[in-house]
């Protein structure tokens, strides 16, 4: 009896050399970065076991956008030039994915692209804990989707772009990754994202925040600083994952879930003192679990924020990158020169000029 041959499903057309589809058009996309509260709960290692508590992450998109542009190359290689990273070029499918631009090469390989120059310009500092690489991936997927549309393939929905960007990033990283960075990049605005952890359902549920007050009103209640040193999120995240798996910090994470709910509700009703209180409690718990989550400058800024009656939290997994504060408008105004004075002691540090960005990827 002849063996039955396996069927390989048609995955759709490969993009191929971009020279022809780009001959009479320009493809440029952009997406916002984010500040966050309750991060790490978007990693499945946490939200599946904690699902009964409705794990949630809050993020606020900032108008420090990452822009991606596609242009044809003179050869078949994939060329990528990104802010703060040396230009790199590899033949299709040959790039090492542990390269600083490995995620971008993996996205290009997913689409079967060749002969393309990818330009990535970011308004946020590199490796600053604002979700930059995930933002670039969402913008690049959107750019390739629009180019694929010229071959008759419809563009993906926002949700599908988020899921694809997350899947490629997690595969390249080789460690569990969260979803919140891709969601902020795709949708913009101010959201609480719940992680339902239900098989067969969407991996996230969206709740808009500050809809009554309006997102723009929050601008005067926020302060964001770059600490002048980069961070590597997987270092801290790996510690948290290991602790959680070894049952060393379960109560702390249950408390973080509750504090994230408190923070989301306070933000939605525009109760800044309550939001600041929840933020400081959450930061204290994480500092107790991983003291290095705030380096020396971050500790000084956080102490100054609390002394001014504001909340302070690192972005992403901390350990460098950025720190942000929330509080009453007068308290934030008083805190701003204090932070500026402290940051002036480190030439690479400084306050970031940013506002809430209500647009997602565009």
Image (cartoon, grey):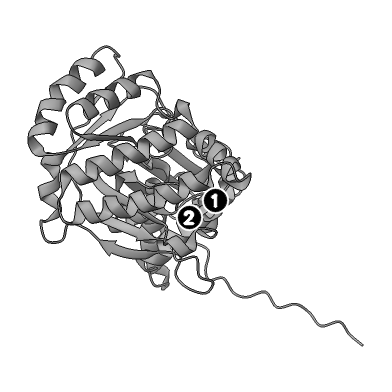
Q: Name the residue furthest left.
A: 330
**Image marks 1 and 2: residues in contact by CB distance under 8 Å:** yes
Q: Is residue 128 above or below residue 114?
A: above
Q: Give the residue pinned by disc 1.
A: 170
Residue 53 vs residue 230, the one in the foreground:
53
Q: Residue at x 24, y 16 (%)?
A: 342
Q: Quadrant of residue 275?
A: top left
Q: Quadrant of residue 152?
A: bottom left
Report the label total. Answer: 2
Q: Residue at x 52, y 68 (%)?
A: 13
Q: Split into 4 quadrants, where in the image is the N terminus? A: bottom right
Q: Is residue 79 visible?
A: yes
SS class of the residue under badge 1? helix
Residue 77 vs residue 96, the one in the foreground:
96
Give the crowd class for mark 2: few <14, some 14-19, many >=20 residues within 10 Å: many
> Residue 327, percent across and down?
17, 38
Q: Is residue 263 left or right of residue 218?
A: right
Q: Give the residue pinned by disc 2.
A: 166
> Residue 29, percent across and down?
30, 52
Give the crowd class for mark 1: few <14, some 14-19, many >=20 residues within 10 Å: some
Rounded to the nearest angstrom, the CA distance separating label 1 from label 2 is 6 Å
């Amino acid at each position: 009896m002849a063996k039955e041959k396996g069927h390989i499903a048609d995955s759709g057309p490969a993009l191929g050399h971009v020279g022809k589809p780009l001959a009479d058009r320009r493809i440029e996309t952009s997406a916002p970065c984010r500040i966050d509260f309750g991060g790490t709960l978007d990693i499945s290692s946490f939200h599946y076991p904690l699902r009964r508590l409705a794990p949630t992450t809050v993020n606020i998109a900032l108008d420090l956008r990452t822009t991606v542009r596609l242009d044809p190359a003179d050869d078949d290689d994939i060329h990528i030039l990104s802010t703060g990273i040396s230009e790199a070029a590899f033949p299709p499918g040959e790039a090492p994915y542990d390269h600083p631009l490995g995620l971008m090469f993996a996205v290009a390989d997913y689409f079967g692209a060749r002969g393309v120059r990818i330009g990535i310009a970011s308004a946020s500092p590199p490796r600053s804990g604002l979700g930059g690489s995930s933002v670039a991936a969402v913008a690049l997927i959107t750019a390739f989707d629009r180019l694929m549309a010229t071959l008759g393939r419809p563009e993906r929905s926002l949700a599908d772009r988020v899921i694809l960007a997350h899947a490629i990033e997690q595969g390249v990283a080789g460690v569990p990754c969260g979803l919140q960075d891709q969601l902020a990049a795709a949708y913009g605005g101010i959201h609480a994202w719940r992680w339902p952890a239900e098989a067969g359902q969407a991996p996230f549920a969206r709740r808009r925040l500050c809809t009554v007050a309006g997102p723009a009103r929050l601008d005067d209640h926020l302060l964001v600083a770059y600490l002048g040193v980069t961070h590597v999120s997987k270092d801290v995240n790996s510690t948290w994952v290991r602790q959680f798996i070894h049952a060393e910090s379960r109560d702390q994470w249950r408390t973080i879930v509750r504090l994230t709910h408190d923070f989301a509700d306070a933000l939605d009703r525009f109760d800044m003192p309550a939001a600041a209180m929840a933020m400081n409690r959450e930061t204290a718990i994480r500092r107790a679990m991983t003291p290095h989550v705030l380096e020396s400058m971050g500790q000084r800024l956080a102490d100054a924020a609390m002394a001014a009656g504001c909340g302070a939290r690192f972005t992403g997994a901390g350990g460098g990158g950025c720190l942000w504060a929330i509080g009453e408008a007068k308290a934030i105004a008083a805190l701003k020169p204090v932070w500026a004075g402290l940051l002036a002691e480190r030439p690479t540090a400084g306050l970031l000029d940013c506002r809430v960005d209500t647009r997602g990827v565009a």
